[in-house]
Image: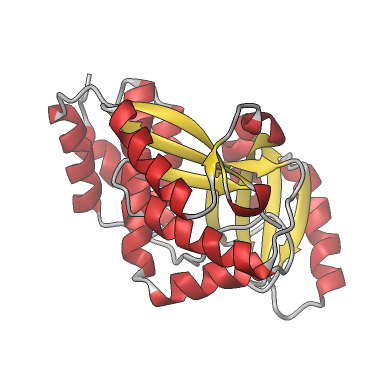
Amino acid sequence: MFRNVTSTCWRVCSVYDGINVIPRRFAGHSKWQNIRHIKTAKDSARSVLFVKISRQMKVAIQEGGSTDVKKNSKLENVLEQARRANMPVATIQSVIKSCENDKSNSKPHLLELKGPGGCIILCEVFTNNLHTLKQNISTLLKKHNGKYSDGGGIHLFNQKGIVLAEVDESKSTEEVLELATDHAIEAGAEDVKRQEPEGTLQFICGATNLKKVVTGLEKFSYKITSASVDYVPLKFQELGDDDLKLCASLYDKLEALPEVVRLSDNIA
């Protein structure tokens, strides 16, 4: 099942691009963005990013049942993220080899958490002992005024393809957005926004349309810095300063758990 690992990795990851490793948000300027950005600036951001991508690779291989990107579109998307992040090929090969030798029967799960101030956090995990992990997360939630959601949290989100591209600084915001809107339509994207304070363009598309949109935008010479399928909130939750700080602390603790693959939230 796990064949052609080396050739696949080199084919997908041989070209290296730069990447802005600041976590993506789907709203405009906000206190939550600033708190998360400050945290990232203090962390070893590249190392954190590589850990997250490694976990996503394991999930993609388990769900897709193959390391062949022609047969596993989820893995192809994650390897593309790895390429854009300049993740070393040796690291990628090591992760894939560990999946070949993994006998733990770990499986992906989605946990719905209710964080401080009533925000919803979707916690994607990969574990072979869900019961113990949920107990550990429950302890963290209690310390941060949170709890498990009663259900229905997933319905407050849509899965969307999110593509980030560098902004042409020689043009005004109006010119950039006008041109990007035309390009978005031709590439098959649903919407385009200019993110602040990062100064990047954010193209939104259907989850199954991601590769097509990336290819279309690259034809217009956009430098893509990130492309992935994410949970996008249908409605945002405003939080006060104290709750924002608690959420930032909760994120730190959750992301430190080796079983946690990715976190999404509806915080404005």
In the figure, is residue 124 to the left or right of 92?
A: right
Instruction: Name the one closer to the observer, 217 or 163.
Output: 163
Q: Quadrant of residue 207?
A: top right
Instruction: Name the one closer to the observer, 4 or 35.
Output: 35
Quick check: can you spot residue 14?
Answer: no
Residue at point 87% right, 70% down? Answer: 174
In the figure, is residue 245 to the left or right of 179?
A: left
Q: Quadrant of residue 247?
A: bottom right
Q: Check the picture and name the quadrant holding the N terminus.
A: top left
Instruction: Name the one closer to the observer, 97 or 102.
Output: 102
Instruction: Name the one closer to the observer, 124 or 227.
Output: 124
- Where does residue 193 sit, x and y in percent of width and height? 76, 58
Q: Check the picture and name the quadrant holding the C terminus.
A: bottom right
Residue at point 40% right, 50% down? Answer: 254
Q: Quadrant of residue 31?
A: bottom right
Query: Tag count in the figure?
Result: 0
Quick check: can you spot residue 175?
Answer: yes
Residue at point 70% right, 70% down? Answer: 196
- Where does residue 70 sit, x and y in percent of width and height? 39, 26
Residue at point 70% right, 51% down? Answer: 203
Looking at the picture, does residue 238 appear above or below residue 40?
above
* Way the structure is coloured: secondary structure
Looking at the picture, does residue 187 appear above or below residue 75?
below
- Where does residue 122 sit, x and y in percent of width and height? 54, 40
- Where does residue 21 sit, x and y in percent of width and height? 47, 65
In the figure, is residue 117 to the left or right of 172?
A: left
